[in-house]
Amino acid sequence: MNTESAGDQHLDHLFSNSAARMDRWRDLNARAQGWAAATRGGGGPGGSLPVREALEAVRPMETYFAYPGAQLLRRLDERIVDDDARGAARLILRISNALLSGSYRYEEGAWEEGADADAEVPDRLPPGLGGAATRRPYFEALFVTPAPAARLAAMAREIRHLRRPDDLMVYEAVMVGSFEDAFLAAVLNGKLEAVVIYDGIPIPSEHDVPLLRDFLKVYKHLDTSTAAPREVGVQLAQAIKHLRPELDVYVLTDRKVEELAGDRKASMIRRVFYEVEEPMEVHLNILEGVLERYATPYFDNLKRYAARPISTFHALPIARGKSIIKSNWIRDFGEFYGLNLFLAETSATTGGLDSMLEPTGNIKVAQEKFARAVGADQVFFVTNGTSTSNKMVYQAVTKPGDIVIVDRNCHKSHHYGMVLSGAQPLYVEAFPMTAYSMYGAVPLRTIKKALLDLKAEGRLDRVVMVTLTNCTFDGHIYNTRRVMEECLAIKPDLIFLWDEAWFGFARWSPFLRPRTAMGAAAALEQWRGDPAAQQAWDDQVQELGADLDPRDERLLDRRLVPDPASMRIRVYETDSVHKSMSSLRQGSIVAVRDEDYQHHASAFREAVFIHASTSPNAQIIASLDTARRQMELEGYELVMRAIEIALAIRMAIARHPLISKYFSVLGADKMIPDEFRPSGFKDYLQPGGNWMTAAKALMDDEFCLDPTRLTLVCGTAGYDGTAFKNLLASRYNIQLNKTSRNSVLLQSNINNTRSDVASLIKVLLEIAEEIEARLKQDGEAGRMAFDSQVKSLMEDVPNLPNFSRFHDGYRDNPASVTREGDMRTAFFAAYNEDECEYLPIRSQTMDERLANGPDLVSANFVIPYPPGFPIMVPGQIIDADTIEFMRKLDVKEIHGYNGARGLKLIKTSAIKERGTAD
């Protein structure tokens, strides 16, 4: 985020401090080893100054972590003071390696300060799977106390002594003494799982943290400037739950605990303790809270099932694995995957395994835990991908004749969902990024205009749902709260379906969470209960009237406020858990926060019966369960690291003189028009920028970019997106997903490491060097050919076609200014081959039909890859712009297009006028 070196970064430069901490320890280790080497070489004492300076750079951040802790740091200080270069170097190396490998979490020796302990350097490699004995999970708990600083180390030791052999987990205490230090610890330390707050804590940190104070002021509900001393503890609890809602928060107080426990402002506190009560109760509550998140009811039961001696007489020979392990021909299959996979396979729903179709046991509990984790009222597991999740929602909440306002560029499952339910799509257009052959997101003004046009025609009652993709494939994030807020001002009972297939991880980022569907729904619910909401509505009524006039042009450009008394919060979110969390492929969820869900409960159940398999994969269900566990316990740290990885890639490419000559990563200034960025935010690497700059953009701008998604321009290196993707895969074993005419999409996720960054940068450098060498060898002719190729890719790009319209035969009211249509009827009309025709796109007949008619009516969805969205849908009139786009496409994969016969069209003579008899 900021462009300062690790040594210059401040504590509150929050986007990169995880990596910066390790960088500082590596720097300290390098200086210590150099000091020790100089001492061995006869350099004599007195060379400790560089080590002291590096240690002072490390020390402030270590306040917020349990390891190495005050005891080891004090021992290190003593060795430096004694000019014990070798002893200091050994201890620093041991600490640095323990931090890198995480060995301090399971090796008691890593915490010891004796000479024997630090003579042995721990293994830098983390423990492997299956080779080591089971160990107790480790976490850290934050204790915020007004006790004197000199007392904190002793308090930490007292807390450590509360451990019992029977405890299923172990934790270390992190001790801080103020509101700001506690908030910083929650920001910086991803291993925190619980926070214990003592009443009477002060507010300011002893460190200089100006950005943190700006952050707390911008988020007014976190501002402590006017807090009374007795309110600081509760306000800290609120601030931490806002930042990391998964953390358990406890408060210790000497006031009347029953009053605090009954205060709605303290509802986020898991338990209130009287300060002089037995500390063991606090200890046990901390463990219980973490164990509650750790529990994976379905996976835990599946492990128990696999360990039982079971005879199977049902239709799944692979269960228990005997048909594989005893085989003479496929035994290698079993050896590759391991026996547990087959021991855990079953088609039974008895014995505690539960049914996906009618969950009443551990699947039901697992779904409830996932709902709590993502802030939903309900979550439904889906084992055949978000394509099915989307279709289930359409099947449940829409019916024939309903109108759905939908992004034309959304995933094909939405279009097919409307074919199945009979809902009529009213397509709204995203802003184009023609230079890169991709679309952005749909402006709010466009969505409001569609609603107001329908209201003007007296058909607003038919609009049931708004469907948008958040974030888009290329990383465009909507201001979800504002979209819903303003749409509800026009129609207060609208349903919203947010396809967050690529964005499920965002729940665990405090910066991205407000832009998720569930995060925005929670914010709207909170806003509705605030007296300021009613005042905002009253002010709007005074200016615009209670019933908005759809002909009032001010409505399109003014921020609209819904009536808090009549608005309904009806939000559905679909997540591809497998795309951004540790789930097996096709693991997906439908998250529901719908106040009127009871109206659709029966229909939703039917939708599950229609779309869910009666033979769901038990391993996918288990992986959904464990993915939730992981994200609740370490998702915050993993997501922050994924953001760091993405920023590191951006920085490495931009700063390398040769790589940046041929490749670049697009910033917000290239991917989002200025009108949608009132903050002025341009890029995560913009000079003078910091994480607060990005936070303000995420809070205010209509659209912003997901920092983990990077559009890498390769056209300037002479490669089209598909060719570059194939080069990376075949020659360098680097896999990626989406391409455009002149770019590829890179995505960092919780699986990536800094080693992956190094690998990518090395490959880009090698390719850039090869281009340089080839241009030098080929001379002027080669340079001209290269420039011509770059111009073709970067400048001679086809215009992106917009949706034209549905044929009048598929419209209920052809005279309407809106463009919804009956796509379902057109889709099934194409099943009658006698009423269809085929026409090659480059034929003379095609040109004649475009010029003189009759209309060309698409029979199919036509989806070129890239860009991966339908450029034609059933019943759509095909115009010249769309054909021109197809003719300029240089992709090999076009779904719905018959290369040998041409476009499949519905004959206009076969299309019945709406309202005529069949």
Image: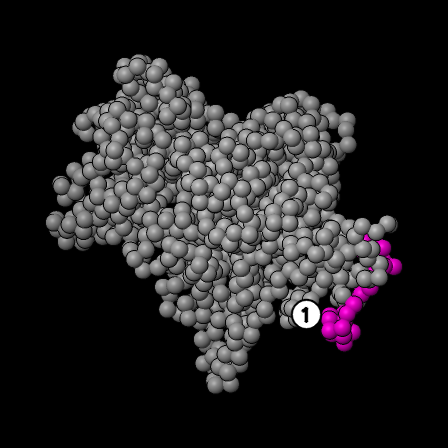
Task: Write the residue at 77% across / 56% down.
Answer: 809
Characterize the local packing of mark 1: few (<14), some (14-19) or many (20 or more) Cα atoms within 10 angstroms. some
Residue 239 falls left or right of residue 487: left
For badge 1, the amino acid type reads Ala
Query: Magenta segment: does it hold 93?
Result: no
Percent x, y of residue 181: 27, 36
Image: 163 above or below 403: above
Residue 434 at x, y = what percent? 54, 66
Q: Residue at x 41, y 32 (%)?
A: 530
Q: Which residue is mark 1?
A: 880
Residue depicted at 44% across the width and 59% down the height: 675
Counting every numbered tag in the picture gives 1
Judged from the image, the secondary structure of the residue bearing numbered disc 1 is: helix
Q: Which residues are magenta?
A: 828-854
Residue 266 point in image, percent of width and height: 37, 24
* In the image, farthest residue toward the bottom: 780
Q: Relative to the observer, which residue lies in front, 679 or 500?
A: 679
Viewer-closest of 562 and 35: 562
838 part of magenta stretch? yes
Tell me where residue 229 appears, x and y as whole percent.
Answer: 23, 27
Residue 320 visible in image: no
Taking the image as drawn, is residue 746 in sight?
A: yes
| Figure colour scheme | one colour
From the viewer's perspective, is residue 397 above or below residue 278?
Answer: below
Quadrant in the picture for residue 682:
bottom left
User: Residue at (43%, 24%) from the top-left corner?
Assistant: 289
